[in-house]
Every structure is written in structure tokens, then in C-alpha cells.
Amino acid sequence: MTRIPGSQGFDLAKGLLGAALDGIAIADCNGRIREFNPAAEGIFGCKRADMLGKRLEAIIPPAMRKAFRQDMAHPQCAGKGMFVGRRVKATGVRANGSEFGMELAITRVSLRGRSAFMAVLRDISEGKQVEAMCAAGSERLDAVMTEAGVASWDYDLLTGCPSGLEQSSPMVAKYTNGDASEWSLTNPKDRHEAVARFKSAVAAGGAGYYTEYRLLHKDGVTVRWLEVSTTILRDETGRSARAVGLLRDITERKDFEARTLFLAHRDELTGLPNRTLVAEHIGQAMAQADRSGDHVALLFVDLDRFKTVNDSLGHEVGDQLLRQVAARLDHRLRKSDFLARLGGDEFIMVLRGVKKPADAARVARKIVASLARPYPVGIHTLRISCSIGVSIYPDDGGDTQTLMSNADRAMYHVKDRGPGHYQLFSREMDTRVGRGR
């Protein structure tokens, strides 16, 4: 029990009460207020004279008054009561009826030899407002980050303790179900680059960088792309102490980029390369042939009367037929060969390592036979033939354009003779035969 000074220290006690920054109210053993300092006046918005003689309960939140009365009724429990002897946070009521946050501690003291109570009060409403503002700001920030698909992370470099992904982030929870350990770096290249860049940044200290890598879920199938920003923070000694940063899920962007790249170089219907890659592959094949002394064969493959299929059965059936034709052509390829769809019902094949024109003729003959077999398409069984024109490098041209033009001319020569055949280009062909005719 704290003892209040006697008459010799009375002036000192009053001086201390007056100078105290916290509100202080002293009540006698009956709970009547005998002292109410200026800070308490300011907190409650009332005068000392108005409070003297009132019960101490007047400044105690209503929800706590029952516990206070029980403590007053049992003086022997000083310091161990339900209320007295404890520091609590509560909601107080000012003289004008407004509520505020306060911290309250009531202690038993001795006043002129008698038991008394001293209540020390602190107005924490401003702190509460700051906390509320911080909480609101945090909620707004979380909302913005979630909308932007961004989460934060934090790693203590000195203790090696990661805060990891902020588990409160809805963006993270969406993919991790609250457990980031379900994910790991998916391939050795990503892992090596991520670790190397992180170590380099830690060594440099204060350097920030961006990187992208893939995360693989423990199901072994789901892959997410992340864009990660990293900043290294130093402590007061200049050591790299923390690594903090933001991460963004960029899987949709990566999927879009991959799809765009695919469509730029691939035929969407069949998945084969499109005409944008043809010249490049022919050029590579010619360069290899120059080194090896072999030949390169270009095969122009055109389906006969394909338009009839589209007109009579519809484009959906026509598309399914084209996919099957592409699959059969692809089956005839070696690893060194190249197949592309030029558009519509036209395909081109580039054969490397051809020893003589007869080798190309043999491949063309097999393709004619393969494509002539029936095609099961839904409820239909379709048959279609093809016409193939063949040109040989370097015999029929020394550049891509000439080779393609001569293969095209040979193919139209076949169509003039009748569908379902192949033809090697020859100089004796009528130069008027071709698409420009």
C-alpha cells in the first residue's frame, strides 16, 4: 500500500499532483473523491470543486463499476482484485457525455492513516485515433494492393527469420491457402538466378532490383509467374539487415505473352508453324546443305477440292479435317525436317539431307498415299486427295523465293494433269503455269 505524505509533505504532494501529466483522483475509504488534479479536470472537462465529494465511481466506466465495488468491499485483496491493482484500458465519459479512450490504474493508498484509493488516468484517445487511422490506412492499402494483385514480403537477414509473404494478403491467400510453403521455385535456372541476385543485392546493400520467376505448387501441375521487387535495408551499423519488397502475380500477363508469341509464329488451328518461319528454316537448310553437299527439297502440298468440304459440311468439319491432315503430314517428318501451314488448305515441307531428287519424290509419293486414306470426322467418313509440287536446292533455285515459286509452279502443273499426284519441278515446264496465270 502506498502512503501519502503527512502534513509536513502536504505542500509537496499538492505540487506533485498539480504537475502530474496524468489525471489523478484520490478517494477516501468510502469512495468519496477528496482530490482531483488539473490534468483530471482537463481529461473529464469538469472542475475540481464539482468533483470533490462525489463517488469515485463517477469517473469509472459503468461496465467496471461492479468489479470496483467488490474490490472496495475486500480491502485485504489489495493488488489482487478484479479491478483495483490492475492497469486496464477502457472507454471513459466526459462531462459533456462524449466517450474517449483511457488507460486507468487504481491503487490502494494510505491517506492520513486511513485506507484510500488513488486513480491514475491517461487519455489515450489521440493514440486510439492514430491507431484507427493506421488501421484504416492499412485496410485501404490492403484493398489497393489486392486490387493490383500485389503482396509484400519481409526477411530478417540477421536472424534468418522470414516474415515471408504477408499471410493477410488476399492475393497471396488466393494461391497459397494461407500456406506459402506449398509453393517452391520450379526449375534450377529460376532458383539459381533468384538466389544469385539476392546474394548480390545483400552484399551491395541498399540496392533494389526486379526479377521474375516461376513457382510450382506441390501438386506438381500448377505454375504461377511472379514479379518480385527487392530492396535491402541497412541497420545503424551499415550492415544489410532486412530484405523487403513487393511481389505481383503476372501469370495472366505471361500467358498472354506466350499466346501472342505462339500466334505470331504458329497456326492457331493446327499448332504448326506458320509462313513467318518458312523463310528462316529454308535459309538454315540451304546453309547446312552448302556445308554438307546434300540437297534441300521443298514440297508444296495443296488439298484437292477442300472448298467443297467447307461448303457442303461446314467450316467446323473442315477444320477437323485440316487438323487430321496436319497430323498425318507431321507423322512423315524426321526431326531435321520442317512443316508449316501456309494458310487455307496449303502446307509446305522442308526436307534436309536429301541425297538426290528421287529421295524427295519417294517422300512425296508416300504423302499422297497417306492423305488419300479415309478421315473419320464426327458422323462423316471423308476422303480427300492432294497435289504436291517439289523443288530441289540448289538444282531448281539458289534462293528462298525462287525455290518456293518453282515448287508452287510444279504443284499447279499437277493440278492441270489431275489431282492426287506429285510433280518435281523441271525447266521444261511452261513458265505461264502458276498462280499469276
Image (cartoon, rainbow, N blue to C red):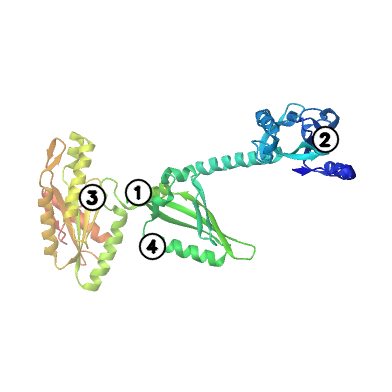
Q: Earlier in the sequence, mark 4 or mark 3?
A: 4
Asked if labels 2 and 1 touch by Cβ distance under 8 angstroms, the answer is no
Write down the quadrant of residue 187 in the picture: bottom left
Residue 287 lies left or right of residue 309; in this view the side is right
- Residue pictured at 38% horizontal, 62% vertical: 189
Mark 2: which amino acid? Glu
Write down the quadrant of residue 133 in the picture: top right
Measured Cα–Cα span from mark 3 to mark 2: 111 Å
Measured Cα–Cα span from mark 1 to mark 4: 18 Å
Q: Which residue is mark 2?
A: 35
Q: Which residue is mark 3?
A: 435
Secondary structure beneath dot 2 equals: strand
Q: Which residue is mark 1?
A: 222
Badge 4: few (under 14), some or many (20 or more) residues near its Cα, within 10 Å? few
Measured Cα–Cα span from mark 1 to mark 2: 70 Å
The image's mark for residue 189 is 4
Q: Earlier in the sequence, mark 4 or mark 2?
A: 2
Q: Position of residue 377 (x, y in %)?
A: 16, 39
Mark 1: which amino acid? Thr
Q: Position of residue 8 (x, y in %)?
A: 90, 45
